[in-house]
């Protein structure tokens, strides 16, 4: 983080668990009629901070190949480990806050026949994030928007990654943080977008949303939110301007 910004910690906004009734205004399908933008929501991963699950996968696989760990340490290939960590049922439960950190580790340990303890696993699991020039540009742009618009982060994230990012990359100060593990919901579930709108107190057509995953953007657009796929800062700037958002 450069000296021109001094980000500190943000505020996590919780919500009812996934079993509760949908809360908020009734939202029609399809695009809503244009209105003035009042809130801007950013995804976190690969937008405001970059990450690579393969960093953890390779560390686990290398440890599994170590003679000191003994036979039977690792039962899966790197691809199998990656599939376990990315959008698997286990990860979904963890990101919805239905498993604690130790409970998640216990299941991973059993599935991969790990000979690691929890303290050894934590840095492998967490140290997959890095802050790029792209991320800094998005952050600085967001900070400038915060003078005139409500700003939020809506992220599918587990408690271990959230707490690690909060310690290592203090980028949350400008945003309301809407984290899946606190909300008991994950994108692309429609209820998480309903809940985000309720938290921010805005209608879908007055909300701008940027995410790097097209399927998550499409889910939001289906509720009338003005969603855009994040590609780079130039495209983000063009999308903001095309939505009538003032950038100064």
Image: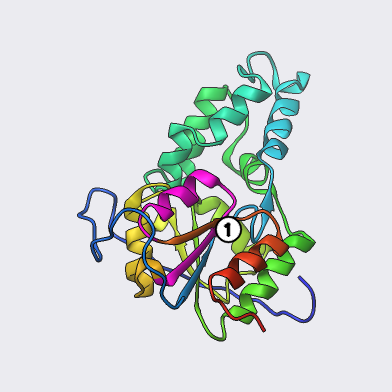
Q: Residue at x 20, y 55 (%)?
A: 21
- In front here: 131 or 160? 131
State the residue lying farthest toward the left.
21
In the displayed structure, 185 sits above or below 153; it is above
Are there few (<14), some (14-19), or many (20+) residues within 10 Å of tag 1? Answer: many
- In front here: 22 or 204? 204
Residues in magenta, as a range? 206-224
State the residue lying farthest toward the top.
71
- The residue pinned by badge 1 equals 44
In the displayed structure, 45 sits above or below 85; it is below
Is 221 in the magenta? yes
Which colouring convention does the figure follow?
Answer: rainbow
In the displayed structure, 157 sits above or below 12; it is above
Left or right: 198 in relation to 188: left
Location of the N terminus (image quadrant):
bottom right
Q: Residue at x 42, y 54 (%)?
A: 220
- Estimate the x, y position of residue 118 in percent, counting from the top left: 57, 40
- Estimate the x, y position of residue 103 in percent, counting from the top left: 44, 39
- Estimate the x, y position of residue 91 in percent, counting from the top left: 48, 38
Answer with the quarter of the image where residue 204 lies.
Answer: bottom left
Answer with the quarter of the image where residue 197 lies.
Answer: bottom left
Location of the C terminus (image quadrant):
bottom right
- Estimate the x, y position of residue 246 in percent, counting from the top left: 59, 81
Q: Element at badge 1?
A: loop
Picture mark count: 1
């Amino acid at each position: 983080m450069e000296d021109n910004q001094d980000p500190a910690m943000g505020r996590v906004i919780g919500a009812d668990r996934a079993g509760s009734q949908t809360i908020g205004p009734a939202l029609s399908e399809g695009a809503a009629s244009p209105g003035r933008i009042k809130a801007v929501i950013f995804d976190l991963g690969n937008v405001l901070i970059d990450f690579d699950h393969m960093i953890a996968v390779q560390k686990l696989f290398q440890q599994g190949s170590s003679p000191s760990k003994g036979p039977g340490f690792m039962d899966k290939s790197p691809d199998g480990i990656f599939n376990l960590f990315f959008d698997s049922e286990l990860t979904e439960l963890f990101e919805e806050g239905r498993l604690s950190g130790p409970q998640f580790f216990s299941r991973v340990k059993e599935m991969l026949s790990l000979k690691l303890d929890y303290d050894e696993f934590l840095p492998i699991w967490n140290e997959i994030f890095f802050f790029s020039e792209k991320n800094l540009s998005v952050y600085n742009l967001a900070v400038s928007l915060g003078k005139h618009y409500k700003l939020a982060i809506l992220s599918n994230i587990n408690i271990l990654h959230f707490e690690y990012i909060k310690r290592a990359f203090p980028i949350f100060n400008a945003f309301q943080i809407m984290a899946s593990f606190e909300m008991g919901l994950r994108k692309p579930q429609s209820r998480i977008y309903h809940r985000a709108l309720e938290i921010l107190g805005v209608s879908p057509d007055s909300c701008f949303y940027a995410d790097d995953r097209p399927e998550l953007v499409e889910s939001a657009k289906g509720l009338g939110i003005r969603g855009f796929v994040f590609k780079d800062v130039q495209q983000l700037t063009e999308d903001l301007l095309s939505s009538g958002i003032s950038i100064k």
